[in-house]
Amino acid sequence: MMRPEAQVLLLSADEFYRRFVKQRVELWSGRVVPMTPVSSLHARTAVEVAFCLRQFVGSDGERGRVLVEAGFLVASNPDLVLAPDVAVVRPGRDLPARGWVPGAPDLAVEVISPDDQWRDVQRKVARYLEGGTDLVWVADPEQRLLHVFRPDQPPLTLTAAESVTGDPVLAGLSLPVAALFPAP
């Protein structure tokens, strides 16, 4: 027999921060979801993506800021805090020194790990888009593919031989997809 959902403790984003700030977790509709440590291929891919994006935006913040594993308060009541592997926020966004970045990232990048289920990845992409993210990249380092999602547009899958743009978040950005992945 299933237990009634009413007995589940739901957390706000503030309480989640106080309790779990030093742990690798996300908050999904008030429920804490643990995240396992990532593989070296996953980590190396996230570094390559962050490096490419940081080179484009520069250090002055005029084109935006690149963040790695920052928590974003994507939705409230119930609260949803997501931590993309890499994110870009447009210039002028509030980036508090503590707590979660208010709102969804403008560009969210998720790197697929070997044990990730595609339906779970799609669910996370949907939450970003519903929360206001304008561009989501899902990098598959094993297949060397980049899946690109924009609101109200069909998804696009690019191979390492193709290029990806940063529109509408990073106008003028065009990167070879291969540059986002570590050398084999």
Image (tube, helix red, strand yellow):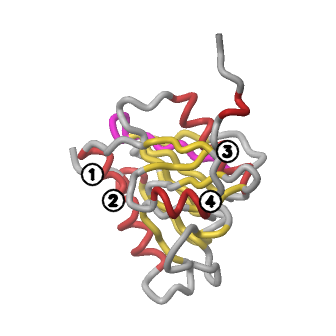
Mark 2 lies on residue: 48
In whole angstroms, how far apart are the C-alphas of marks 3 and 4?
Answer: 10 Å
Sequence-wise first label, 3 or 4: 4
Mark 3 lies on residue: 29
In whole angstroms, how far apart are the C-alphas of marks 1 and 2?
Answer: 7 Å
In whole angstroms, how far apart are the C-alphas of marks 3 and 1?
Answer: 34 Å
Q: Secondary structure at mark 4?
A: helix
Mark 4 lies on residue: 13
* Circle 3 crowding by C-alpha within 10 Å: few under 14, some 14–19, many from 20: some
Sequence-wise first label, 2 or 3: 3
Measured from the top left, where is residue 164 in percent x and y?
52, 55
Sequence-wise first label, 3 or 1: 3
**Nearest to the observer: residue 76 or residue 135:** 76
* Residue at x-position 52% and y-position 85%: 61
* Residue at x-position 27% and y-position 51%: 182
- Which kind of residue does numbered mark 1 sit on? Pro
